[in-house]
Each structure stands twice: as C-alpha cells, then as structure tokens.
C-alpha cells in the first residue's frame, strides 16, 4: 500500500505535530509542525523538513545551523494525527544549542535545566 500524506489528520491550520527521536539512543529531541508538503518533501529527500508557524515558511533542519536531521524512519500514530520521525541527529536539535529541546525538568516543584548547551566542535 502506498502512502499518501493527504490521509493524515491535520489540524485546522493544516498542520500535524512531528516528534523527532534519535534513532540510536531513543532520546526525544524535539517537536515541530509539518504540513502535507513538508511530509512529502521529508519522505522524498530524507532531510527532515518542518513548517515554521512564526515565519510561515518551510525549514529544513540544519540548513543554516549545520545541525541536520537525516531521516531513518517515518511513523504515523494510530489516530493518524501525530508523526514520529527517527533521525540521525548531527549536533544540537534545539535552537538553544542543546541536544534536546526537552532540557527542563520539574523536580520537587522547581524547574531544573538538565541538559547543558553543547560545545561547538
């Protein structure tokens, strides 16, 4: 059976959440949005492409930073309203320079940063 991005359940803005996970470690790296064209482009090129809601434009992860995401697997959840992309991540996934966007943990009612900014190589 061939895959058709139009069969996904997009929100009222035509977007679907996409969770990026490191293919080797299983670490959750980030969540961003895709539209049908970003989904198709990701599958066609193997370079993960998202839709920027603030810029109203496509962005290929790592295009300006060099911190790329190479697609390993593309999964659709049971409700077809969320995506999981497993990736080979080069460098930081987060725009703050951290490996993951999920670097803040709530511990005993306080926010604690658990992931440092990565050093530039």
Image (cartoon, rainbow, N blue to C red):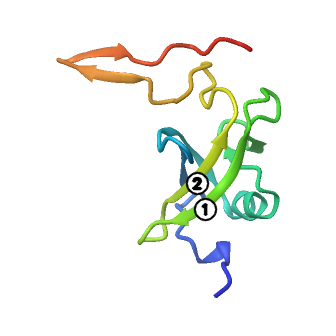
Look at the picture and state if 80 lies above or below 101: below
Residue in view at x 73 percent, y 43 percent: 56
Which residue lies under the disc numbered 2?
85
Q: Secondary structure at mark 2?
A: strand
Asked whether residue 13 is in view, the answer is yes
Using residue 42 as the reference point, say whether residue 115 is left or right of it.
left
Q: Residue lying at the far left in this picture: please name it.
A: 108
Please state the total of marks drawn on the protein image. Answer: 2
Mark 1 Cα within 10 Å, few/some/many (few <14, many 20+)? some
Q: CA distance from mark 2 to mark 1?
A: 5 Å
Picture coordinates of residue 115, whole percent (x, y) = 46, 18
Task: Name the foreground residue: 69 vs 30.
Answer: 69
Residue in view at x 77 percent, y 50 percent: 47
Residue in view at x 63 percent, y 26 percent: 92
Look at the picture and state if 41 lies above or below 28: below
Give residue 74's mark: 1
Q: Could you tell which of marks 2 and 1 lies nearer the N-terminus? A: 1
Task: Name the foreground residue: 103 vs 118.
Answer: 118
Picture coordinates of residue 90, whole percent (x, y) = 70, 33
Using residue 45 as the reference point, say whether residue 84 is left or right of it.
left
Using residue 72 as the reference point, say whether residue 79 is left or right of it.
left
For the residues labelled 2 and 1, say whether their Cβ atoms are less than 8 Å apart: yes
Give residue 86's mark: none
Look at the picture and state if 24 lies above or below 95: below
Q: Secondary structure at mark 1?
A: strand
Within the image, what quadrant is residue 54 found in?
A: top right
Asked whether residue 14 is in view, the answer is no
Picture coordinates of residue 81, whole percent (x, y) = 48, 65
Mark 2 Cα within 10 Å, few/some/many (few <14, many 20+)? many
Look at the picture and state if 101 lies above or below 7: above
Using residue 34 as the reference point, say whether residue 84 is left or right of it.
left
């Amino acid at each position: 059976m061939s895959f058709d991005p139009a069969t996904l359940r997009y929100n009222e803005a035509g977007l679907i959440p996409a969770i990026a996970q490191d293919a080797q470690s299983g670490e959750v790296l980030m969540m961003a949005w895709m539209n049908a064209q970003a989904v198709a482009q990701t599958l066609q090129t193997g370079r993960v492409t998202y839709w920027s809601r603030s810029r109203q434009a496509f962005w290929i992860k790592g295009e300006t930073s060099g911190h790329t995401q190479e697609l390993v697997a593309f999964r659709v959840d049971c409700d077809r309203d969320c995506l999981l992309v497993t990736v080979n991540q080069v460098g930081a996934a987060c725009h703050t320079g951290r490996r993951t966007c999920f670097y803040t943990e709530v511990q005993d009612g306080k926010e604690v940063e658990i992931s440092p900014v990565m050093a530039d190589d």
